[in-house]
Amino acid sequence: MNKNGLFWFGAVIGLALILGGAWFAVSQNYRFKGVVIDPPVPASDFALQDQHGNIYRLSEQRGKIVLIFFGYTNCPDVCPITLSEFKRIKALLTDQADRVEFVFITVDPQRDTVERLAQYLPNFDPQFIGLTADQATLEVVWKAYGVYQQKQDTGSAAGYLVDHSARTYLIDQQGNWRINYPYGMASEKIVQDLRYLLKKQ
């Protein structure tokens, strides 16, 4: 290699080291926007039926980030707003969106059948995953994630409502429960966390 070639080779290596050092410094100082689980804990596995009638196991999603929200299709406000935010998050991720799964687990299994989920989720994104099961199976999952769920009889023809917790759970690529996001967290902030974790991998 001549002197000119050695110069450019050295310059490229030097630039790579500088950029690598800068990324390391930034990554060491990064602060997640949600409520961090420190240290992260292994996410409780589950096997539930999706809107296509297939069994979805959380443990089979390693390598992807999974965002989970517990809600129900008859919800008048929090659930459709959160799913709309999921749609926005996916759009902001652009070419990285296929590395994140958006999962909606029902807190109302009596009404949220496979068929109902299949009708409901395409209103937001047909690739969003809706999960259901019988009451006993879901109660185990709710308990594992600290989900509050309570029917409230409205006395109207529309039927009952369900009071429920409204946070979003982030499960990282290693299957660890890493972050909780409160209802109303800005999509842009969640995307920052997602991009950081995706880049770190």
Image (spheres, rainbow, N blue to C red):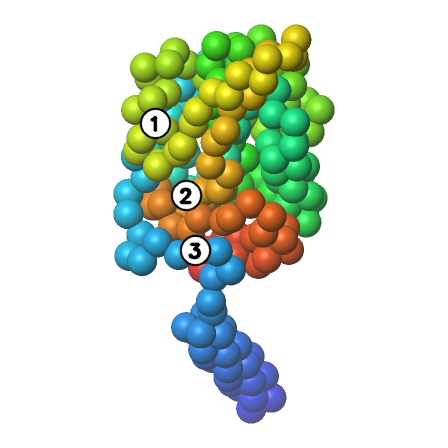
Q: Position of residue 107 (x, y in %)?
A: 46, 23
Q: Residue furthest bottom?
A: 3
Decide: few, some or many residues near mark 1? Use Cα within 10 Å; few <14, some 14-19, many ≥20.
some
Query: Which is in the foreground here, disc 2 or disc 1?
Result: 1
Question: Residue at position x 46%, y 14% from top?
Answer: 109
Q: Position of residue 90 (x, y in %)?
A: 64, 42
Q: Using the image, determine if residue 55 lies above or below residue 174.
A: above
Q: Secondary structure at mark 1?
A: helix
Q: Which mark is residue 60?
A: none
The amino acid pointed to by label 1 is Val
Which callout, 2 or 3, points at the residue further toward the start of the chain? 3
Which callout, 2 or 1, points at the residue further toward the start of the chain? 1
CA gap between label 3 and label 1 equals 20 Å
Q: Residue furthest front?
A: 155
Q: Which residue is mark 2?
A: 171
- Of residues 87 and 152, the one nearer the viewer is 152
Q: Using the image, determine if residue 169 lies above or below residue 117.
A: below
Which callout, 3 or 1, points at the residue further toward the start of the chain? 3
CA gap between label 2 and label 1 equals 14 Å
The amino acid pointed to by label 3 is Val
- For the residues labelled 3 and 1, say whether their Cβ atoms are less than 8 Å apart: no
Q: Is residue 141 left or right of residue 182?
A: left
Q: Which residue is mark 3?
A: 35
For the question of whether residue 93 can be seen, the reply is: no
Q: Which residue is mark 1?
A: 141
Question: Residue at position x 34%, y 45% from top?
Answer: 176
Question: Residue at position x 44%, y 74% from top?
Answer: 29
Q: Using the image, determine if residue 40 lies above or below residue 115.
A: below
